[in-house]
Image: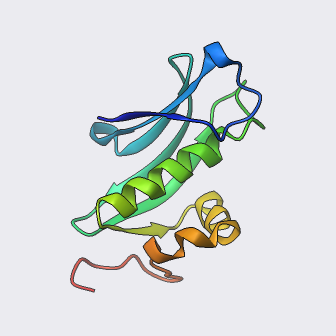
């Protein structure tokens, strides 16, 4: 499990630095502030895809940009691993629309999740 400091979250004191990691056991990317779980981006893994189904910010951590930092990190890992992201989660889908530099790692789908054979 890798842990990477993120600089994109706002309103986080330096001693409360955000770290983002992939918790593969729980199939989610986790954002932690000062070691405390602050946000998650849940996915379903497949051999060539990560299907993002839900993003959540825990109470007390809202409006700080933490979910955006978690999604950015997740998509960077998708790119590094040579995978494709399937954004079923509305937050992830909207985030990608605002960040077209990640369009190369996205599988657009409106009615179904792609099979690995696709």
In the rendered image, residue 41, in percent from the top left (x then y), is placed at: 50, 47
What colouring method underlies this structural image? rainbow
Camera-nearest residue between 20 and 24: 20
- Corner quadrant of residue 8: top right
Q: How many marks?
A: 0
Identify the residue at the far bottom of this view.
118
Name above or below for residue 21 compared with residue 113: above
Q: Residue at x 44, y 72 (%)?
A: 105
At x 34%, y 59%, the residue is: 80
Q: Residue at x 49, y 83 (%)?
A: 111
Instruction: Specify the quadrant that holds the N terminus.
Output: top left
Q: Is residue 27 left or right of residue 58?
A: left
Q: Quadrant of the C terminus?
A: bottom left
Q: Position of residue 99 (x, y in %)?
A: 65, 66
The residue positioned 44% from the left and 42% from the top of the image is 29
Q: Quadrant of residue 91?
A: bottom right
Q: Is residue 83 left or right of residue 42?
A: left
Would you place residue 82 above or below residue 116 in this image? above
């Amino acid at each position: 499990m890798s842990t990477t400091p993120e600089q994109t979250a706002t309103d986080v004191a330096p001693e409360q630095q955000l770290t983002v990691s992939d918790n593969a056991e729980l199939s989610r990317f986790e954002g932690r502030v000062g070691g405390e779980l602050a946000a998650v981006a849940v996915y379903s893994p497949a051999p060539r895809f990560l299907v993002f189904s839900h993003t959540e910010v825990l109470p007390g951590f809202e409006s700080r940009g933490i979910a955006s930092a978690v999604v950015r990190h997740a998509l960077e890992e998708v790119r590094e691993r040579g995978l494709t992201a399937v954004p079923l989660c509305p937050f992830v889908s909207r985030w990608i629309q605002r960040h077209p530099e990640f369009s190369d790692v996205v599988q657009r789908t409106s009615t179904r999740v792609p099979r690995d054979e696709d």
